[in-house]
Amino acid sequence: MTPKQLEQLILANHRTLELFAAQWTMAPEDCVQEAFLKLFRLDRPVENPKAWLFRAVRNLAIDSGRSEASRRNREYVAGQARCLFTSKPEDLLSSEEIQTALERLSGDYREVIVARIWGRLTLEEIAEAFGMAPSTVHRRYELGIQKLKQYFKVPCHKNKTQ
């Protein structure tokens, strides 16, 4: 991977990866930076760098979160105040509303939804990155979206076949 390719990958994905890592650690930027460094130092290029980064960030963030366990109770409140989204006046939902809704989801649903919507990974790429069956990813995505719809009180429109 050339430095220019790495730069483009960083600019396109670092914010989403930080949002993704924030599920498990109070230092998402560190995990993302370490993942990019690992990618750059690989001897052979990976087939799908974006999916590889999601998996690497996930593993690094989980490890980081485990090491923070003794401090988590004290620092949890400060970490939640951190805004991970930006809002524009024309947005239908504020960044705070989105963040609150995501925080209410279990980690299994949240990680898939963040990777799919903000990371723009396909369900197959998520399955590969997280070492899950595609059917598990699909189920978690669908159930997570249903829970978000319930949270925002969005009516479910079902096709009526008669």
Image: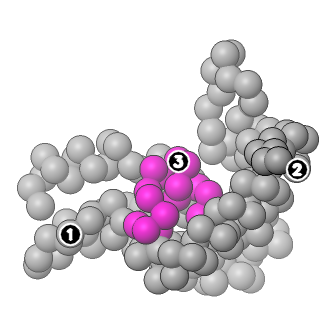
Which callout, 2 or 1, points to the residue nearer the camera? Answer: 2
Residue at coordinates 75% horizontally, 73% vertically from top-left?
72
SS at mark 1 in the image: loop
Residue 74 in the image, given as x and y percentages of width and height: 81, 68
Question: How many neighbours does mark 2 have within 10 angstroms: few (below 14), some (14-19), or many (20 or more)?
Answer: few
The residue at which mark 2 appears reads as: 150
The answer to whether residue 142 is left or right of residue 119 is right
User: In terms of secondary structure, what is the magenta stretch mainly?
Assistant: helix
Q: Quadrant of residue 136?
A: bottom right
Residue at coordinates 75% horizontally, 30% vertically from top-left?
93
Q: Quadrant of residue 109?
A: bottom right
Inter-mark Cα distance, 3 to 1: 21 Å
SS at mark 2 in the image: helix
Task: Say which amino acid is labelled 2.
Answer: Gln
Q: Which residues are magenta?
A: 111-126
When the figure is inspected, residue 13 is found, relative to residue 41, above or below; the finding is above
70 or 117, nearer to the observer: 117
42 or 153, nearer to the observer: 153
Task: Say which amino acid is labelled 1.
Answer: Glu
